[in-house]
Image (cartoon, coloured by chain):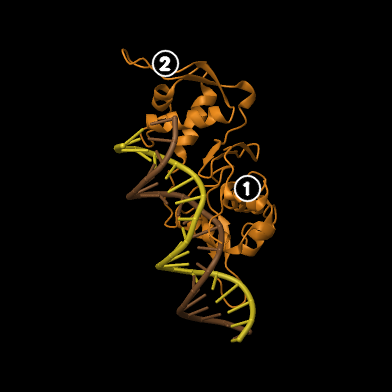
Chain colours: A orange, B yellow, C brown
Amino acid sequence: MPRKPVTLSMVGGKGPRQRIWESIRRLSAAADAGDFTEREIWGAAEGRDQLEMTAIVDYRRCLIAAGVLVQTSQPVKQSPGRYRLARDEGLEAPRLRRNGERVTQGLAQEQMWRTLRMLSGDTNARELAAHASTPAIPVAESAAGAYLRMLDLAGYLDITAECVRDPQRRSQQARYRLRADRNTGPRPPMVCRVGAVFDPNENAVVWQQQTVTEEDCIYGN
DNA sequence: CTCGTATGGTATAATGGGTA
DNA sequence: TACCCATTATACCATACGAG
């Protein structure tokens, strides 16, 4: 089966790569073993019955290409290849392509979410885009507006000023502030294509589109 | 043959930006 | 504001290969 929606592939609020990464760090931290096999990675992974070996092979490929993981012994005869963590990059699984390049997708939302959590006052789409932008990852105002709208729908925000549309003058963008009780954690709530907002901090779908879909009928949701 | 692995390909969800 | 589209990310597949 190809890639599943995040709401399905998440186990304990974590995607497969995140769980593989944590498993690798656990194995590296263990006193006895400096290196490990792919099978050991699988064995130490959280929710491993929902983790394919191919996912581990794939991610290991990326990590090797990026130099985060190094191979300590070639797979010869019956003994599988062994690997060692060369560079521990912290709690979050490094997001990588197969050639070892860093993934930039999704960083915009991450930066916006971080900015929202840091801001003490309220903000609007334009200001959020400006604050969240970095030289490497610019955040478009339209992206900021869309993200704010979805967060608002999902109940994360207080509206501090309604948007004003005055044909005579410049219209004013709505202003929002992150609700203190919805500051759920470091990982940005994800806006999913299927019409849902998933919070990886809470491991929960926090908002779902109200329209009844075909799937609702099939699966009886 | 089987088993484990390596490698390139593919399908599909998510993203970001445009535009009606 | 709501769609649409191209691009990107990534889970899974097909195939190949070497060693029992």
Amino acid carrying mark 2 in the image: Val
Q: Residue furthest top?
A: A168
Q: Nearer the viewer, residue A115 or A36?
A: A115
Numbered circle sitting on residue A216: 1
* Image: A163 above or below A77: above
Please give the name of the residue rendered at 49% of the width and 48% of the height, measured from the top-left corner: A95
Chain containing the residue with disc 1: A
* Image: A84 above or below A114: below
Please give the name of the residue rendered at 62% of the width and 46% of the height, measured from the top-left corner: A14
Numbered circle sitting on residue A164: 2
Closest to the camera, between mark 2 and mark 1, is 1
Image location (x, y in percent) of residue A154: 58, 31
Amino acid carrying mark 1 in the image: Asp
Chain containing the residue with disc 2: A
Say whether mark 1 and mark 2 are on the same chain: yes
* Image: A23 above or below A106: below
Q: Tag 2: Cα neighbours inside 10 Å, few (<14), some, or many (≥20)?
A: few
Image location (x, y in percent) of residue A98: 45, 57
Disc 2 element: loop
Disc 1 element: helix
